[in-house]
Image (cartoon, rainbow, N blue to C red):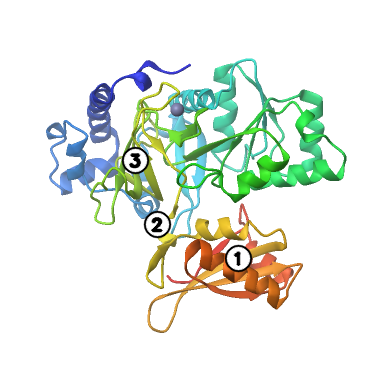
Amino acid sequence: MIPDIEKASTAAIKAFQEVQLKTLLGYLNTHSTFYKRLFETENIDINSIKTLEDLAVIPTTTKDDLQQFNDDFICVPRHKIIDYVTTSGTLGEPVTFALTDNDLNRLAHNEAISFACAGVEQKDVIQLMTTIDRRFMAGLAYFLGARELGAGIIRVGNGIPELQWDSIKKFKPTYIIAVPSFLLKLIGHAEQHGIDLNASSVKGAICIGESLREQDFSLNILSKKIKEKWDIELFSTYASTEMNTAFTECEAQQGGHHHPELIIIEILDEFNQPVAPDESGELTITTLGVEGMPLLRFKTGDIVKAHHEKCSCGRNTTRLGPVIGRKKQMIKYKGTTLYPPAMHNILNDFNEIESYIIEISHNSIGTDEILLKIATSNPTDHFLQHIKDHFRAKLRVLPKIEFCDRKEIQKIQFPKMSRKPLMVIDRRS
Ligand SMILES: [Zn+2]
């Protein structure tokens, strides 16, 4: 199930997107208070924007814009809104996303072609190990996508390894959707309770939230740990509420595929200029076919690298490599640029580390400092040295490291109302 446009030539894909872009600009100019105002104040004649390159004349949209002018982004009257989704805003207040009936159909289609990338077929059964409620979009998208594809779906929700295994035994899912570090918990539970992992019905996992691979697409430490014990295929999927679109890996597992019928992507540098083809930059998106709250040149805050060569699966669309980090969490440290995921990857290597938190701050001379607070079953100098050596070898720089009480770290990790544990505390702003 590969849409024809995804197998078309690069030129045909571009021409197709330019037609869609024209439709979008007309729609925004009629229905979006925010973009109509932007076109007026910036003196932009939307009829002069004909190619993807022409997009560069339009200022980018930021998360702060969404938060400050939330209602001005909504393009439909209230009675057309079916589903309300929220995301945490950068300035505190959550941002509301309004989805219409058409948007829910679009979301279903998006997730269906995304599942198809990972090889999911109508005959498959998927066990959903993420939440579907709490005003999240992801769980709902998975449900709708499975339904569109005709695949079965078991909504277990997140956590509770015992219930997950119970459900795996009972309903025999062939795929699971989970955060990769939760797969380690499932493995741990199976080992403790004599469940034969490799005799289970599960053949693949669609993984969200954490990277599975290094930038060269080799397995990172987390996925090596999973694969060592549990021989299943791991597919990465990357998505966000703002994008209304997922980038999911195919069987080649060489980055998440772009679906050009759903979204326009740009990779921009810090001056909002396109980066060279082999460089990383901030993913900037323009949604196609969204009715409730379409976005034009929205800066996602995620630093990624795009890969443009044709894929062995037959799709000729751009693939996005693992998210290198959040732009806001970029750290300038001892002459190098570094993002927290690189540190997560190193720390995940140590079984003795029970939990940790990365604190970033400005020091008295205005440069960045990194402090790793680690709770461990082995708080010895020898182990500390071992961690330090690992950092020097892998990152070539060494942050400050402190052993801490596990309870103290947990208190920092779970502030009130947090949806997931904080792994990074940024005290710079
Ligand atoms: Zn592919």
Which amino acid does the dot numbered 2 rest on? Lys
The residue at which mark 2 appears reads as 327
Picture quarter with ligand 1: top left
Residue at 52% over, 37% down: 237
The residue at which mark 1 appears reads as 357
- Label 2 crowd (10 A; few <14 / some 14-19 / many >=20): some
SS assignment at label 3: strand
Which of the 4 quarters of the picture holds residue 242?
top left
SS assignment at label 1: strand
- Label 3 crowd (10 A; few <14 / some 14-19 / many >=20): many
Q: CA distance from mark 2 to mark 1?
A: 19 Å
Which of the 4 quarters of the picture holds residue 172?
top right
The mark closer to the camera, 3 or 1, is 1
Mark 2 and ligand 1: say if the CB distance to the nearest ligand atom is below 8 Å. Answer: no
**Of label 3 and label 1, which has the lower sequence position?**
3
Residue at 67% over, 60% down: 350
The residue at which mark 3 appears reads as 285
Counting from the top left corner in percent of width and height, residue 261 is at 36, 25
* Residue 404 located left or right of residue 257: right
Which amino acid does the dot numbered 1 rest on? Ile
**Of label 2 and label 3, which has the lower sequence position?**
3
**Of label 2 and label 1, which has the lower sequence position?**
2
In the image, residue 344 sits, relative to residue 114, either above or below, namely below
Which amino acid does the dot numbered 3 rest on? Ile
Q: Is residue 415 visible?
A: no
In the image, residue 288 sits, relative to residue 423, either above or below, namely above
